[in-house]
Image (cartoon, grey):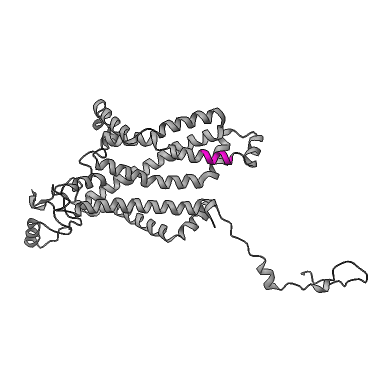
Amino acid sequence: MAANYDIPTPKKRLLSLQINPELFKKATDEEKKQQDVMAQSTTFFKDGMRRLMKNPLAVISMLILVFVILVMAFAPAVVPYGYDEIITVEGMRDKEAANLKPFEYSPKEQAYMEKYNVQIFPHIMGTDELCRDYFIRVVYGTRVSFFVGIFASLMVLVIGTIYGAIAGYAGGRTDLIMMRIVDIIYSLPDVLIIILLAVVLRETLDVSKIPLLGALGSNMISMFIVFGLLYWVGMARLVRGQVLQTKENEYVLAARSMGASSGRIIRRHILPNCLSVIIITTAQEIPTAIFTESYLSFIGLGVSLPRPSLGSLANAARSGMQSYPWKLVFPAAAIVLIVLAFNLIGDAMRDAFDPKLRK
Protein backbone atom coordinates (compact mmCIF):
# COMPACT_ATOMS: atom_id res chain seq x y z
CA MET A 1 0.00 0.00 0.00
CA ALA A 2 1.48 3.37 -1.06
CA ALA A 3 2.29 5.85 1.67
CA ASN A 4 0.62 9.24 1.80
CA TYR A 5 3.16 12.07 1.63
CA ASP A 6 0.65 14.95 1.72
CA ILE A 7 1.95 16.69 4.83
CA PRO A 8 -0.07 19.76 5.97
CA THR A 9 1.68 23.11 5.84
CA PRO A 10 2.79 24.15 9.33
CA LYS A 11 1.61 27.46 10.70
CA LYS A 12 3.89 30.25 11.86
CA ARG A 13 4.08 30.51 15.61
CA LEU A 14 3.54 33.82 17.31
CA LEU A 15 6.76 35.80 17.98
CA SER A 16 8.73 33.31 15.87
CA LEU A 17 11.48 34.51 13.51
CA GLN A 18 10.85 31.79 10.95
CA ILE A 19 9.45 32.59 7.50
CA ASN A 20 5.71 32.22 7.24
CA PRO A 21 5.15 28.90 5.35
CA GLU A 22 1.79 30.12 4.05
CA LEU A 23 3.65 32.47 1.71
CA PHE A 24 4.85 29.46 -0.30
CA LYS A 25 2.77 27.46 -2.76
CA LYS A 26 3.25 23.86 -3.71
CA ALA A 27 4.67 23.29 -7.15
CA THR A 28 2.35 21.76 -9.69
CA ASP A 29 3.24 18.63 -11.67
CA GLU A 30 4.03 20.69 -14.77
CA GLU A 31 6.40 22.93 -12.82
CA LYS A 32 8.13 19.88 -11.39
CA LYS A 33 8.64 18.44 -14.90
CA GLN A 34 10.24 21.70 -16.03
CA GLN A 35 12.93 21.27 -13.37
CA ASP A 36 13.75 17.77 -14.61
CA VAL A 37 15.19 18.96 -17.94
CA MET A 38 18.68 17.47 -18.26
CA ALA A 39 21.12 17.28 -21.16
CA GLN A 40 21.52 13.89 -22.80
CA SER A 41 24.77 12.08 -22.11
CA THR A 42 27.22 12.36 -25.00
CA THR A 43 30.89 11.96 -25.87
CA PHE A 44 33.42 14.35 -27.32
CA PHE A 45 33.22 12.74 -30.76
CA LYS A 46 29.41 12.58 -30.83
CA ASP A 47 29.09 16.18 -29.72
CA GLY A 48 31.59 17.30 -32.37
CA MET A 49 29.86 15.33 -35.12
CA ARG A 50 26.50 16.81 -34.11
CA ARG A 51 27.91 20.31 -34.46
CA LEU A 52 29.63 19.34 -37.71
CA MET A 53 26.41 18.08 -39.31
CA LYS A 54 24.73 21.44 -38.58
CA ASN A 55 27.21 23.16 -40.93
CA PRO A 56 25.66 23.17 -44.45
CA LEU A 57 28.99 23.74 -46.24
CA ALA A 58 30.51 20.77 -44.43
CA VAL A 59 27.56 18.54 -45.35
CA ILE A 60 27.75 19.56 -49.01
CA SER A 61 31.52 18.98 -49.04
CA MET A 62 31.10 15.52 -47.51
CA LEU A 63 28.48 14.62 -50.11
CA ILE A 64 30.86 15.74 -52.87
CA LEU A 65 33.66 13.60 -51.43
CA VAL A 66 31.34 10.60 -51.09
CA PHE A 67 30.35 11.01 -54.74
CA VAL A 68 34.00 11.24 -55.82
CA ILE A 69 34.90 8.15 -53.78
CA LEU A 70 32.02 6.18 -55.30
CA VAL A 71 33.13 7.18 -58.80
CA MET A 72 36.73 6.16 -58.03
CA ALA A 73 35.58 2.82 -56.64
CA PHE A 74 33.03 1.74 -59.24
CA ALA A 75 33.95 3.58 -62.46
CA PRO A 76 36.77 1.16 -63.44
CA ALA A 77 34.30 -1.74 -63.10
CA VAL A 78 31.73 0.00 -65.32
CA VAL A 79 33.85 1.75 -67.95
CA PRO A 80 35.28 -0.81 -70.40
CA TYR A 81 38.51 1.13 -70.95
CA GLY A 82 41.86 1.02 -69.16
CA TYR A 83 43.90 4.05 -68.20
CA ASP A 84 46.66 3.00 -70.66
CA GLU A 85 44.44 1.21 -73.16
CA ILE A 86 44.36 2.53 -76.72
CA ILE A 87 40.91 2.51 -78.30
CA THR A 88 40.46 -0.20 -80.89
CA VAL A 89 37.65 -1.08 -83.30
CA GLU A 90 37.37 -4.73 -84.39
CA GLY A 91 40.85 -5.42 -83.05
CA MET A 92 42.49 -2.55 -84.97
CA ARG A 93 43.78 0.68 -83.47
CA ASP A 94 41.46 3.60 -84.14
CA LYS A 95 43.80 6.45 -85.05
CA GLU A 96 40.83 8.74 -85.69
CA ALA A 97 39.83 8.55 -82.00
CA ALA A 98 42.48 11.05 -80.91
CA ASN A 99 41.38 14.23 -79.09
CA LEU A 100 37.66 13.51 -79.27
CA LYS A 101 35.28 15.88 -77.53
CA PRO A 102 33.17 14.69 -74.56
CA PHE A 103 30.53 12.09 -75.62
CA GLU A 104 31.87 12.11 -79.21
CA TYR A 105 32.55 9.00 -81.29
CA SER A 106 35.15 8.54 -83.98
CA PRO A 107 34.05 7.77 -87.57
CA LYS A 108 35.13 4.13 -87.19
CA GLU A 109 33.11 3.77 -83.99
CA GLN A 110 30.05 5.26 -85.65
CA ALA A 111 30.40 2.92 -88.60
CA TYR A 112 30.81 -0.05 -86.24
CA MET A 113 27.65 0.88 -84.31
CA GLU A 114 25.65 1.24 -87.56
CA LYS A 115 26.99 -2.02 -88.96
CA TYR A 116 26.27 -4.22 -85.96
CA ASN A 117 23.45 -2.13 -84.42
CA VAL A 118 25.20 -1.92 -81.03
CA GLN A 119 26.02 0.91 -78.67
CA ILE A 120 29.62 1.59 -77.66
CA PHE A 121 30.23 2.97 -74.19
CA PRO A 122 30.63 6.76 -74.65
CA HIS A 123 33.81 8.71 -73.97
CA ILE A 124 32.45 10.85 -71.14
CA MET A 125 35.38 13.28 -71.16
CA GLY A 126 36.61 12.59 -74.67
CA THR A 127 40.00 11.11 -75.50
CA ASP A 128 43.61 12.23 -75.36
CA GLU A 129 46.19 12.55 -78.13
CA LEU A 130 47.08 8.84 -77.89
CA CYS A 131 43.47 7.65 -78.37
CA ARG A 132 42.94 6.76 -74.69
CA ASP A 133 39.69 7.37 -72.82
CA TYR A 134 40.14 10.56 -70.81
CA PHE A 135 37.48 9.90 -68.18
CA ILE A 136 39.12 6.74 -66.86
CA ARG A 137 42.50 8.49 -66.79
CA VAL A 138 41.02 11.29 -64.68
CA VAL A 139 39.49 8.68 -62.36
CA TYR A 140 42.84 6.93 -61.87
CA GLY A 141 44.55 10.29 -61.41
CA THR A 142 42.04 11.13 -58.67
CA ARG A 143 42.80 7.77 -57.05
CA VAL A 144 46.49 8.66 -56.92
CA SER A 145 45.76 12.07 -55.38
CA PHE A 146 43.48 10.54 -52.73
CA PHE A 147 46.04 7.87 -51.90
CA VAL A 148 48.80 10.46 -51.51
CA GLY A 149 46.61 12.72 -49.36
CA ILE A 150 45.43 9.98 -47.00
CA PHE A 151 48.86 8.34 -46.69
CA ALA A 152 50.63 11.66 -46.08
CA SER A 153 48.09 12.72 -43.43
CA LEU A 154 48.53 9.40 -41.59
CA MET A 155 52.31 9.86 -41.60
CA VAL A 156 51.91 13.39 -40.25
CA LEU A 157 49.44 12.17 -37.62
CA VAL A 158 51.67 9.39 -36.26
CA ILE A 159 55.07 11.10 -36.38
CA GLY A 160 53.93 14.59 -35.35
CA THR A 161 51.73 13.39 -32.48
CA ILE A 162 54.38 11.12 -30.95
CA TYR A 163 57.19 13.65 -31.35
CA GLY A 164 55.18 16.62 -30.05
CA ALA A 165 53.76 14.66 -27.10
CA ILE A 166 57.22 13.48 -25.97
CA ALA A 167 58.72 16.97 -26.33
CA GLY A 168 55.90 18.67 -24.45
CA TYR A 169 55.70 16.12 -21.63
CA ALA A 170 59.45 15.83 -21.08
CA GLY A 171 60.08 19.59 -21.05
CA GLY A 172 63.35 21.16 -20.03
CA ARG A 173 66.48 20.36 -22.03
CA THR A 174 64.82 17.50 -23.92
CA ASP A 175 62.10 19.83 -25.17
CA LEU A 176 64.68 22.45 -26.12
CA ILE A 177 66.76 20.02 -28.19
CA MET A 178 63.76 18.40 -29.89
CA MET A 179 62.22 21.72 -30.87
CA ARG A 180 65.51 23.01 -32.25
CA ILE A 181 65.54 19.93 -34.47
CA VAL A 182 62.03 20.88 -35.58
CA ASP A 183 63.23 24.41 -36.42
CA ILE A 184 66.04 22.99 -38.55
CA ILE A 185 63.69 20.62 -40.41
CA TYR A 186 61.17 23.41 -40.89
CA SER A 187 63.77 25.48 -42.78
CA LEU A 188 64.58 22.77 -45.34
CA PRO A 189 63.14 23.27 -48.88
CA ASP A 190 60.83 20.35 -49.61
CA VAL A 191 60.82 20.62 -53.41
CA LEU A 192 64.63 20.65 -53.60
CA ILE A 193 64.87 17.56 -51.39
CA ILE A 194 62.27 15.74 -53.51
CA ILE A 195 64.31 16.48 -56.64
CA LEU A 196 67.55 15.31 -55.01
CA LEU A 197 65.98 12.15 -53.62
CA ALA A 198 64.34 11.32 -56.95
CA VAL A 199 67.68 11.65 -58.76
CA VAL A 200 69.54 9.59 -56.15
CA LEU A 201 66.92 6.83 -56.08
CA ARG A 202 66.78 6.70 -59.87
CA GLU A 203 70.55 6.28 -60.12
CA THR A 204 71.19 3.96 -57.17
CA LEU A 205 68.00 1.90 -56.78
CA ASP A 206 66.03 0.04 -59.43
CA VAL A 207 62.54 0.35 -57.94
CA SER A 208 60.93 -1.35 -60.94
CA LYS A 209 62.04 -4.75 -59.60
CA ILE A 210 60.37 -4.18 -56.21
CA PRO A 211 56.74 -5.44 -56.32
CA LEU A 212 55.01 -2.69 -54.32
CA LEU A 213 57.34 0.21 -55.01
CA GLY A 214 57.77 -0.49 -58.71
CA ALA A 215 54.29 0.82 -59.55
CA LEU A 216 54.94 4.08 -57.69
CA GLY A 217 58.27 5.02 -59.19
CA SER A 218 61.24 6.85 -57.70
CA ASN A 219 59.47 10.23 -57.76
CA MET A 220 56.56 9.04 -55.61
CA ILE A 221 58.88 7.22 -53.20
CA SER A 222 60.95 10.38 -52.74
CA MET A 223 57.72 12.34 -52.19
CA PHE A 224 56.59 9.97 -49.43
CA ILE A 225 60.04 10.14 -47.82
CA VAL A 226 59.83 13.94 -47.77
CA PHE A 227 56.33 13.78 -46.27
CA GLY A 228 57.70 11.56 -43.51
CA LEU A 229 60.74 13.77 -42.92
CA LEU A 230 59.39 17.30 -43.22
CA TYR A 231 55.61 17.66 -43.15
CA TRP A 232 55.01 16.54 -39.55
CA VAL A 233 56.69 19.53 -37.91
CA GLY A 234 53.51 21.64 -37.87
CA MET A 235 51.59 18.87 -36.12
CA ALA A 236 54.44 18.41 -33.62
CA ARG A 237 54.40 22.08 -32.68
CA LEU A 238 50.66 22.17 -32.12
CA VAL A 239 50.60 18.95 -30.10
CA ARG A 240 53.55 20.14 -27.99
CA GLY A 241 51.71 23.36 -27.11
CA GLN A 242 48.59 21.46 -26.09
CA VAL A 243 50.59 18.98 -24.01
CA LEU A 244 52.39 21.80 -22.18
CA GLN A 245 49.01 23.15 -21.08
CA THR A 246 47.36 19.81 -20.34
CA LYS A 247 50.15 18.29 -18.24
CA GLU A 248 49.69 21.00 -15.57
CA ASN A 249 46.16 19.85 -14.73
CA GLU A 250 45.34 18.17 -11.43
CA TYR A 251 44.33 14.80 -12.88
CA VAL A 252 47.77 14.44 -14.48
CA LEU A 253 49.39 15.13 -11.10
CA ALA A 254 47.02 12.60 -9.49
CA ALA A 255 47.94 9.93 -12.06
CA ARG A 256 51.64 10.62 -11.55
CA SER A 257 51.28 10.39 -7.76
CA MET A 258 49.53 7.01 -8.14
CA GLY A 259 52.56 5.62 -9.95
CA ALA A 260 51.33 5.74 -13.57
CA SER A 261 54.10 5.58 -16.15
CA SER A 262 54.83 8.48 -18.48
CA GLY A 263 53.63 6.51 -21.49
CA ARG A 264 50.31 5.71 -19.84
CA ILE A 265 49.81 9.32 -18.72
CA ILE A 266 50.45 10.59 -22.27
CA ARG A 267 48.30 7.90 -23.88
CA ARG A 268 45.35 7.84 -21.48
CA HIS A 269 45.20 11.33 -19.93
CA ILE A 270 46.96 13.90 -22.13
CA LEU A 271 46.41 12.92 -25.77
CA PRO A 272 42.62 12.40 -25.39
CA ASN A 273 42.42 16.04 -24.29
CA CYS A 274 44.36 17.11 -27.40
CA LEU A 275 42.05 15.33 -29.86
CA SER A 276 40.55 18.55 -31.19
CA VAL A 277 43.93 19.86 -32.40
CA ILE A 278 44.97 16.43 -33.73
CA ILE A 279 41.75 15.87 -35.69
CA ILE A 280 41.69 19.37 -37.15
CA THR A 281 45.34 19.35 -38.20
CA THR A 282 45.05 15.89 -39.77
CA ALA A 283 41.97 16.92 -41.76
CA GLN A 284 43.70 20.06 -43.03
CA GLU A 285 46.84 18.12 -44.00
CA ILE A 286 44.98 16.05 -46.63
CA PRO A 287 44.32 18.94 -49.10
CA THR A 288 47.87 20.20 -48.57
CA ALA A 289 49.30 16.82 -49.56
CA ILE A 290 46.95 16.52 -52.54
CA PHE A 291 47.91 19.96 -53.82
CA THR A 292 51.61 19.21 -53.28
CA GLU A 293 51.37 16.00 -55.29
CA SER A 294 49.44 17.79 -58.04
CA TYR A 295 51.93 20.57 -58.60
CA LEU A 296 54.89 18.18 -58.34
CA SER A 297 53.27 15.98 -61.00
CA PHE A 298 52.61 19.11 -63.05
CA ILE A 299 56.35 19.85 -63.20
CA GLY A 300 57.23 16.20 -63.84
CA LEU A 301 58.23 15.06 -60.34
CA GLY A 302 55.13 13.04 -59.49
CA VAL A 303 53.76 9.73 -60.67
CA SER A 304 55.79 7.90 -63.29
CA LEU A 305 54.31 7.20 -66.72
CA PRO A 306 52.08 5.61 -67.91
CA ARG A 307 50.08 5.86 -64.64
CA PRO A 308 48.18 9.15 -64.71
CA SER A 309 47.91 11.84 -62.07
CA LEU A 310 45.76 14.95 -62.00
CA GLY A 311 48.85 17.13 -62.13
CA SER A 312 50.44 15.20 -65.00
CA LEU A 313 47.16 15.26 -66.95
CA ALA A 314 46.98 19.04 -66.55
CA ASN A 315 50.60 19.34 -67.66
CA ALA A 316 49.97 17.19 -70.75
CA ALA A 317 46.89 19.25 -71.66
CA ARG A 318 48.77 22.54 -71.33
CA SER A 319 50.32 22.31 -74.80
CA GLY A 320 46.93 21.95 -76.52
CA MET A 321 45.01 24.34 -74.31
CA GLN A 322 43.76 26.49 -77.19
CA SER A 323 42.65 23.58 -79.37
CA TYR A 324 41.39 21.16 -76.68
CA PRO A 325 40.60 23.25 -73.56
CA TRP A 326 38.40 20.56 -71.97
CA LYS A 327 41.47 18.35 -71.44
CA LEU A 328 42.79 20.94 -68.98
CA VAL A 329 39.42 21.80 -67.45
CA PHE A 330 38.59 18.29 -66.19
CA PRO A 331 41.73 17.53 -64.12
CA ALA A 332 41.95 21.12 -62.90
CA ALA A 333 38.30 21.06 -61.82
CA ALA A 334 38.89 17.74 -60.00
CA ILE A 335 41.83 19.22 -58.10
CA VAL A 336 39.89 22.36 -57.15
CA LEU A 337 36.80 20.39 -56.13
CA ILE A 338 38.66 17.91 -53.93
CA VAL A 339 40.96 20.45 -52.28
CA LEU A 340 38.10 22.90 -51.66
CA ALA A 341 35.91 20.17 -50.16
CA PHE A 342 38.63 19.02 -47.80
CA ASN A 343 39.43 22.60 -46.78
CA LEU A 344 35.78 23.34 -46.00
CA ILE A 345 35.51 20.14 -43.98
CA GLY A 346 38.70 21.02 -42.10
CA ASP A 347 37.39 24.48 -41.23
CA ALA A 348 34.07 23.03 -40.13
CA MET A 349 35.83 20.42 -37.97
CA ARG A 350 37.85 23.19 -36.35
CA ASP A 351 34.64 25.01 -35.43
CA ALA A 352 32.96 21.81 -34.23
CA PHE A 353 35.74 20.12 -32.26
CA ASP A 354 37.64 23.10 -30.84
CA PRO A 355 36.08 23.95 -27.42
CA LYS A 356 37.44 27.50 -27.57
CA LEU A 357 35.41 28.28 -30.69
CA ARG A 358 32.08 26.98 -29.41
CA LYS A 359 29.40 29.53 -28.66
Residue lying at 55% horizontally and 27% vertically, measured from the top left:
173
Residue lying at 29% horizontally and 37% vertically, measured from the top left:
220
| Residue sitting at the far front | 187
Which quarter of the rendering shows the C terminus?
A: bottom right
| Residue sitting at the far right | 15
Residue 184 location in percent, x, y? Answer: 42, 30
| Quadrant assignment, res 209 | top left
Between 342 and 8, the residue placed more toward the observer is 342
Residue 13 visible to an observer of this rendering:
yes
| Residue sitting at the far top | 204
Question: Range of the magenta residues?
Answer: 240-246
User: Is 244 colored magenta in this rendering?
Assistant: yes
| Quadrant assignment, res 155 | top left
In the depicted structure, whether residue 204 falls above or below residue 49: above
Residue 346 location in percent, x, y? Answer: 42, 51
User: Is 208 colored magenta in this rendering?
Assistant: no
Residue lying at 85% horizontally and 71% vertically, measured from the top left:
20
Which quarter of the rendering shows the N terminus?
A: bottom right
| Quadrant assignment, res 116 | bottom left
